[in-house]
Amino acid sequence: MFSAAVILILSTGFFLLYLHVVCQKILRRQFARELWQEIVKANRLEFPSLRKALEESGNPVEYWRLRMMLKCDFHALTYLLKNIPNPNQRYTYEERLLILYFKLGFVSLATRHRLGLRETPAALKLMAILEYFANVVAERENNWRSRGGFLPPHSPSMVTISGLEA
């Protein structure tokens, strides 16, 4: 019984390590043009202002505000990833891994808050994932438009969390 528990714990640890390494490799991808600011402005996402507040002032942002803004931005960007010029309307393998990584990071953020540890490193990791998602959405939109395509009615101009246009 003891050896089974040890094997389970080690297997889980190795899986999380593997997930971390693969996701960090995905996040290091360089984009031809950094267009994520356009997606952020068009959809009124909050994570760049949160990142700026965390990096510049060093003062912790109110946890509940941080949590809600990250969650809303995550839902908006995952909606855009799945629906904006994506003919299959499916996530890629990399996007699925990053979604899982984001959710685990979100749990880590909550755990850090409950234990009274610094939340800033976990929040910055989550914001890096959101920036990657915004870059992917911008790249897809750019590629779609360069091929002469038109965007469906739910274009990134003012998509709300529920998926309906504002």
Image: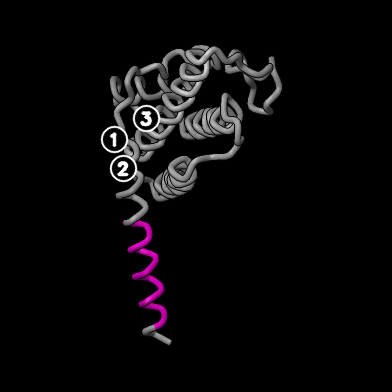
Magenta part of the chain: 4-17
Corner quadrant of residue 61: top left
Q: Nearer the viewer, mark 3 or mark 1?
A: 1
Q: Kindly indicate whether the residue at mark 2 contacts the one at mark 3 (C-beta within 8 angstroms).
A: no
Quick check: 45 above or below 19?
Answer: above
Residue 24 marker: 2
Q: How many marks?
A: 3
Q: Nearer the viewer, mark 3 or mark 2?
A: 2
Residue at mark 3 to residue at mark 2: CA–CA distance: 25 Å
Image location (x, y in percent) of residue 36: 42, 19
Drawn side of residue 166 relative to residue 92, left or right: right
Mark 2 Cα-neighbour bin, 10 Å: few <14, some 14–19, many ≥20 = some
Q: Is 158 covered by the magenta stretch?
A: no
Drawn side of residue 159 relative to residue 122, left or right: right
- What's under tag 3, amino acid-wise? Pro
Residue 60 marker: 3
Residue 28 marker: 1
Mark 1 Cα-neighbour bin, 10 Å: few <14, some 14–19, many ≥20 = few
